[in-house]
Image (tube, helix red, strand yellow):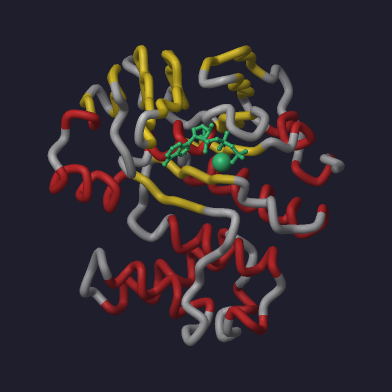
Amino acid sequence: MSPLIALQGVTKTYRLGEVEVHALRGINLEVPRGQFVVLLGPSGSGKTTTLNLLGGLDRPTSGQVLVDGEDIARYDDRRLTDYRARKVGFVFQFFNLIPTLTAAENIAFALELTTRDRAAVRQRTAELLALVGLEDRADHFPSQLSGGEQQRVAIARALASRPSILLADEPTGNLDVETGRQVLRALSDLNRQEGVTVVLVTHNTAIAPMADRVVRLHSGTVASDHMNPAPQEPESLNW
Ligand SMILES: Nc1ncnc2c1ncn2[C@@H]1O[C@H](COP(=O)(O)OP(=O)(O)OP(=O)(O)O)[C@@H](O)[C@H]1O
Ligand SMILES: [Mg+2]
């Protein structure tokens, strides 16, 4: 079976006036459906650039970004927008919830972009809240939630369109260890229970043991790529 994601000879060069920054220098990476991948690397190694290309937020300078066998790098803007809306969910370091909407409303708002069926929105909102362990926080506003809880709402929201890929950039970067573990638990559950493929970017090596696979970037290249024979539960991680 062909992989869900295949990066082939991907380069990304940013031009700043006369200066060229070679952010990615030829990335090759295949990710099968359902895998939980941690992308590790020091600051400036190209992690966010890689994630942005996978998410269709940017295009490579050269190479192919194949998702379900289609090269999204060749999509026009309209198809790329459609790709972002349907296939991928994003989670960032800062949660970006709408402050005037409750947890449930933040999720429902995203669902309403995909359907007009109010009953379906209500049901899926409840399902998503349960998936991230926040059934009892549905009516809290973001200011009434802890950082970890806000991030879990953001994860639930990212799943609204039932994406096959979840891209997370330093999702625990702003959290203490305990709340960070809760966020990783939510990501692990949705990976296992809903089969969502997860690519999690971090410079925190302590997160790596929970992944199915750990890919290390260095200076815009893949420095190492290995499978974890026995991924650990998020609760056992320490940093
Ligand atoms: N829009 C841009 N214009 C010019 N250079 C950029 C741009 N975005 C990223 N870069 C450069 O590309 C390289 C890779 O950046 P990237 O953001 O992918 O790193 P990163 O691994 O995510 O780092 P961090 O851990 O600090 O977030 C860096 O040298 C960065 O300065
Ligand atoms: Mg980054």
**Residue at position x 65%, y 28% from top?**
41
Q: Is 124 left, or right, of 205 in this rendering? A: left
Relative to 114, 13 lies left or right: right
Question: In what quadrant does ligand 2 lie?
Answer: top right
Compared with 29, 68 (above or below) is below
Q: Decide which of 110, 233 is in the foreground and name it.
A: 110
Q: Position of residue 192 (x, y in %)?
A: 56, 40
Q: Quadrant of residue 204?
A: top right
Residue at image coords 71%, 72%: 146
At 41% from the left and 28% from the top, the residue drawn is 19
Taking 159 as reference, is 12 above or below it?
above
Q: Residue furthest front?
A: 18
Q: Position of residue 51 (x, y in %)?
A: 45, 37
- Quadrant housing the N terminus: top left
Give residue 226's quadrant in the image. top right
Q: Is residue 227 left or right of residue 62?
A: right
Give 158 or 28, whichever is nearer the viewer.
Answer: 28
Q: Residue at x 45, y 51 (%)?
A: 90
Of residues 230 and 93, the one drawn nearer to the viewer in this rendering: 93
Q: Quadrant of the C terminus?
A: top right
* Position of residue 2 measured from the top left corner of the image (x, y, whole percent): 32, 16
Pinpoint residue 129: horizontal percent, then vertical percent. 54, 68
Q: Looking at the image, is 126 positioned above or below residue 7?
A: below
**Which residue is more in the foreground, 69 or 23?**
23
Number of numbered discs overlaid on the protein picture: 0
